[in-house]
Image: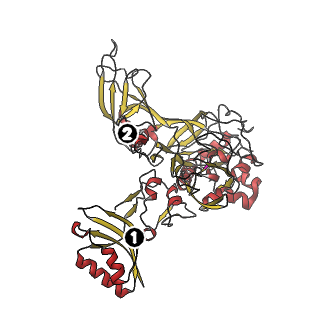
Amino acid sequence: MRSLEEINDKIKSGKVVVVTAEEVVDMVKEQGVKKTARMVDVVTTGTFGPMCSSGIYFNIKQSTPKIKCGGGRVTVDGVAAYAGWAAADIMVGCSAMTDEDPRNAVYPGLFKFGGAHVIQKLVAGEKVRIQVRTYGTDCYPRKEYDAELGLSDMNDAVLFDPRNAYQLYNVAVNLGERTIYTYMGVLKPRLGNANFATCGALSPLLNDPRLRTLGIGTRIFLGGGEGYVVWPGTQHVPDPERDEKGLPLTPSATLAVIGDLKGMSDRYLRAASIAGYGSSLAVGLGIPLPVVDEEVIAYAAVTDEDITFPVVDYSEAYPLGRPGALGRVSMAQLMSGSIEVDGKKVPTGGMASRARGREVALELKQRIAQGSFLLTRPSAALPGAELAQGL
Amino acid sequence: MVKKKLVLSFPPRLIQQPVTNDLIRKFDLEINILRARVVPRESGRIVMELKGSSKNVKAGLEYLDEQGVQVDPMVQEMRHYGEKCVQCTACTAVCPTDALTVEPVTREIIFEPSHCIMCESCIAACSYGAMESQF
């Protein structure tokens, strides 16, 4: 139909036709898959929500005399950092906390300041306090370091997320007798509410459920800047059970992503203090899907009615690892404000933001249309996937 | 009939007095206490919904004034900070009165303070600190 080179040539000449994964739904309804595939070159997707497997690493300029962080102890704004490398590489995971934070000793913990807040401060242009205590060597004699640094003071700063963009996620409910505090939010007892964490028909991996157009090396929108898919995410499931439309039925594909933190913003990297659970980072992530064949459009035309999620009890079944769901509900039902579980009407709430996910897809669409974002061909498919022929 | 949502602030000397009881018995008002915080020797606050004929409501409010109770209309006791909110909609599922709802097309949060009973369920549900209580 069209190759990736042809799409990029169109981007460079400003003639590319880009639509979002929401816009393509109506186009296909009105004009069918064939005609839409002829018209559209790229479909943009987007999501925004807490992705707990997120973190940054950065490299600080050496002091005089020099110091070796590796093997020492490092904190950033009091938050425990990892520096078990060479002299000046430091990593901060979004869920790391300060030593003083009571966690859940005072239940439910508030987790007001963790690694995610360090990350948000940095991308917002603020400085953070880096404190190092280490041992001296002949080549790195200094043992203590204490400085306030911002992103511009660092040699490198990189967002690296081992697991983002879950293809499908559970809808969480609580069958128990007390309110529980989970990574899926506050769940009130006796089916008090049902929380979902997906952007549905806008979600990157639900618009290309068989991962035909993306893989290792795909350039993406990440945290307001640019990034790349670098590996399957941890816990990636290569061969999930699927419905007749190819959509997975359980949490399945995930992505490991990386990008230059210096190009990102606090609009798309936002610290979340999840009560009773911990600190997490809400990440804005968007993937452009090159329309190299009609199948790309057929999959991207997925609607909120098509996508269904398992409803899982987080009072017992989830923590105890018991299989089985209480049923399935569609994204359209979740977005209506309530679903029915065991004959009871249960109000629904989100963890992911459809509004902000839409903003990601529109921003990516704009960058492509303006010629400032070119598509890349994946170097390799993700496990379980086969790349489209035309790529 | 008149219905008002009010915040009553009591000076310490009034804490031992059954002011709410007087409102009901002497002024024939229907009282629905939404929240109350009364600490002996310190000031107390009650958020209530007060219902009755306009004449009785007026008389009741005058009585409160005479007693030295400060009466404020319940506005902005709970605040939604738009710049902190990411529109995730987690708050809407725990809000018992639909004060927090989702606009169906834009998927953005709508906060209607007049429906809010200040149960503060949304505070724990919000991971971004976008809901704050002034109570």
Q: Position of residue A129 (x, y in %)?
A: 32, 35
Label 1 vs label 2, nearer the camera: 1
Which residue is at the front of the view, B17 or A212?
A: B17
- Provide the residue designation for mark 2: A101
Please report the residue visible at 35 percent of the width from the left and 27 percent of the height from the top: A61
In the foreground, B64 or A43: B64
Helix, strand or loop at disc 1? strand
Quadrant in the picture for the C terminus of chain B: bottom left
Identify the image quadrant of residue B105.
bottom right
Start-end of magenta stretch: A167-171
Chain letter of the residue beneath label 2 in the structure image: A
Amino acid marked by disc 2: Asp
Residue B30, percent from left and from top: 41, 79
Q: Which residue is mark 1?
A: B33
Residue A156: image x %, image y %? 43, 31
Main secondary structure of the magenta stretch: loop
